Image (cartoon, rainbow, N blue to C red):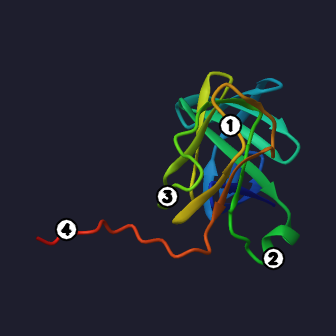
Amino acid sequence: MAFFKHQSQIHEVRAIDGDTLRVDGEDLSLNVAQIDPHHYLLRQGARQTSLFVNQSGDHYQVWYQGEAYELIQQSRAALSAEPEAQDKIKAPLTGTVILVPVQVGQKVVAGTTLAVLESMKMETALTAAADALVKAVHCSPGDSVSVEQLLIELDFEIELDFETESSTG
């Protein structure tokens, strides 16, 4: 059994037998053939699809059906630990920063894109997990970054007022 974090969700993955994976309690019957060290062929019934995986330590970049997914393998100890605020946005992969649409002092809402990275011609957007204030920006477009490199710091502790002031006549 293994646990993987994708965005802010934890997924449990367990191999049941040679052709069955259980993902979050749902059984998936599929055949997996490794083509080369990073390329896998998945067969589910008559359907066949390619999967590309690049691993760096506990970090996995997965490309499936034209989409990029960033997975981080989680230990049982990490899962039982107190959840911490995601106030430090770190690079989930080695790549190049292509966009940083935020600046220090900017108020952001949950889901706001904070930075976009490119790796192997695939783009990965990093977003705010909750409403926050951008405290620091440690990257710029064109920067090369490595896994776990600090990119942006957020402050969740402040009161944010996103309402616009109405003018009175």
Please report the residue visible at 81 percent of the width from the left and 46 percent of the height from the top.
148
For the N terminus, the image quarter is: bottom right
- Mark 2 vs 1, N-terminal side: 1
Labels 3 and 2 touching (C-beta < 8 A)? no
Q: Which mark is residue 167?
A: 4
Q: Give percent across and percent down for residue 50.
A: 63, 27
Can you identify the residue that label 3 sits on?
108
Within 10 Å of the Cα at label 2, are there few (<14), some (14-19), or many (20+) other Cα atoms?
few
- Quadrant containing the C terminus is bottom left
Residue 9 seen by the camera: no
Q: CA distance from mark 3 to mark 2?
A: 29 Å
Q: Secondary structure at mark 2?
A: helix
User: Residue under circle 2?
Assistant: 80
- Residue 72: image location, x then y, percent: 76, 51
Closer to viewer: mark 1 or mark 3: 3
Q: Relative to residue 85, is residue 100 drawn left or right? A: left
Tell whether 92 sits left or right of 65: right
Decide if residue 131 is on the left or right side of residue 64.
Answer: left
